Amino acid sequence: MREVKAITTNKLTKQFGDFTAVDAISFEVNKGEIFGFLGANGAGKTTAMRMLCGLSLPTSGEATVAGLDVYKENEKIKRSIGYMSQKFSLYDDLTVKENMQFYGGIYGKSNAFIKEKTAFILDHLHLQKEANALVKSLPLGWKQKLAFSVAVFHEPEIVFLDEPTGGVDPVTRREFWNMIYTAAANGTTVFVTTHYMDEAEYCDRVSIMVDGRIDALDTPKGLKEKYNASSMDEVFLQLARKATRAAD
Amino acid sequence: MSAISVKNIIKTYGKKKQKVTALNDISFDVNEGEIFGIIGPDGAGKTSLFRILTTLLLADSGSATVDGLDVIKDLKEIRKKVGYMPGRFSLYQDLTVEENLQFFATIFNTSINENYELIKDIYVQIEPFKNRRAGKLSGGMKQKLALSCALIHRPSVLFLDEPTTGVDAVSRKEFWEMLKGLKAQGITILVSTPYMDEARLCDKVLLLQKGKVLSINTPDGVIKDFENPLMAVKAKGMLPLLEKIKAMDIVKDAYPFGEYHHVVMKKEENVEQLKSNLTKADLKEFEIKRVEADIEDCFIQLMKEE
């Protein structure tokens, strides 16, 4: 049997009135890959991501996520993926443990699963002592790491991370990427957006969106060679400067 | 005279058990006409500091002056003289671009015409949309409008709290170009950012972490203070490589840094040792080179020394 890709899109398009936010993008993401999804503000990243998460129906084109069709099986997609937004989305007034129980329950996991997984995460993050502390009392770095753990709590095939490291200190930022590597090594596909160009180097492959299109897609090494650039920052600037439409 | 002078500012929130120290004995001076950067992650205390200096928040103790005026006694005078762009977009969403600008000009007893020269380069970029409501603008345009409104009364000191957070690399570069233009017109700028790479664009920086000053210096000065030898290393299989390097006792610290791992050596003689250790390991696509520290390297080391 042919291996099913984590994500496939074929001329995926989203129009709002006469504005084409996402313009016929076609790409594939392999299983277990860390895929960097870059683009300037307004390039269409969020719209594309919303379609892939089953939150918004495409205008035309095709896409599958975890082998599921974005038109017909968008409800199933929501159950098969994890999502972490740039805005902290755990419940501040619930404890660390309660947050995990809540999200585990939302995804229909059994009590036994939730119990075991909660213990594993608390141990892994060295948060045993804080298990019954309100999430709002945690330092910011821990909150981000906890948010990631919660996003992959139900062991989704694919996790979407929307600027997960914005504003985080440089040490925690690296610890966070360590968690991403571990998740990918365990077979989770990671789809991540970031404004930190050094983080683009940590991805297996990177796509760069400009004006709703994917203008480049390759390994960081391949992109740097193609654009004759010494860093991903340079590659990004060369491509993003070509944008003709206004931001956002 | 310093444009901004801060002495032993302490700010705490909450009571007793839950007490959080947002600013722990902060002192610094900003010269007139300088771009002074407060560099630190979320939760470092940047916004508390900005609110104290713009007279919107009282410190527990310590003193501060802005343009020679005391932030407590002279608060009304200060408010007339400073421009403040908060981290969160705070203009009137249901007024148009032009109405917002008009409103702020009127509040400060001036007119758009009077100080148009100052904002011209920035405002022309959004002028085509002057009849659009502020709430309907894109992120980049909102930022330009907010900056224009903060400047319309020709402030002597401009406070910009995280103007580039969540903004892409291209727009960030453009924003810093605008700041250079304002500096050339003699405006002192205090700007905060969580992006370490923006430190290079400031005349002077204060590295802030958990309410404490890690360093105050010119960007070059911060880098000069980084004394340990620093190496950049890469090879096929970056994760095992990092583990291997971390296990060596000649290594003070090692962490991913873009395409490479940065390796902080304990001593000068360790440089050759690292080279020979790794050469012996017969790694594929192996590369090693000595590099100059980046502000981010300095920040990481200062954080770990705390």
Image (tube, rainbow, N blue to C red):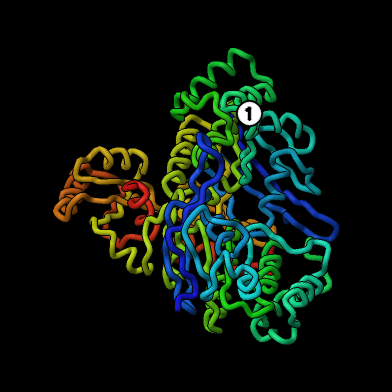
Vertical relation: A87 (above or below) B133? above
Say above or below: A150 vs B1. Answer: above
Q: Is residue B122 left or right of residue B229?
A: right
Q: In the depicted view, which residue is nearer to us: B144 or B7? A: B7
Residue tagged by mark 1?
A94
Q: Is residue A24 visible?
A: yes
Tell me the quadrant of the picture where the N terminus of chain B can be found.
bottom left
Q: Residues within 10 Å of mark 1 (few under 14, many from 20)?
A: some
Q: Is residue B128 left or right of residue A102?
A: right
Judge whether residue A32 can be spotted in this image.
no
* Badge count: 1
The quadrant holding residue B277 is: top left
For mark 1, name the chain.
A
Q: Toward the viewer: B22 or A120?
A: B22
Spot occupied by residue B219 in the image (x, y as percentages of width and height): 38, 67
Q: Amino acid at mark 1?
A: Leu
Q: Secondary structure at mark 1?
A: loop
Residue at 63%, 47% (x, y): give it.
Answer: A27
Which of the two residues, B10 or A144, is positioned nearer the viewer here?
B10
- Who's the residue at 50% across and 63% down the image? A235
Q: Among all residues in the image, which is located at the extreme left?
A: B269
Query: Residue A233 in the image: x percent, y percent?
Result: 49, 62
Q: Residue pushed farthest front?
A: B73
Can you say whether B36 is above or below B52 in the image? below
Residue occupying image coordinates x 81% and y 49%:
A59
Q: Residue furthest right?
A: A17
**B73 and B33: which is toward the camera:** B73
Residue A52's x, y, as percent?
A: 69, 42
From the top left corner, tell me how far across and down residue B35 is, in percent. 48, 73
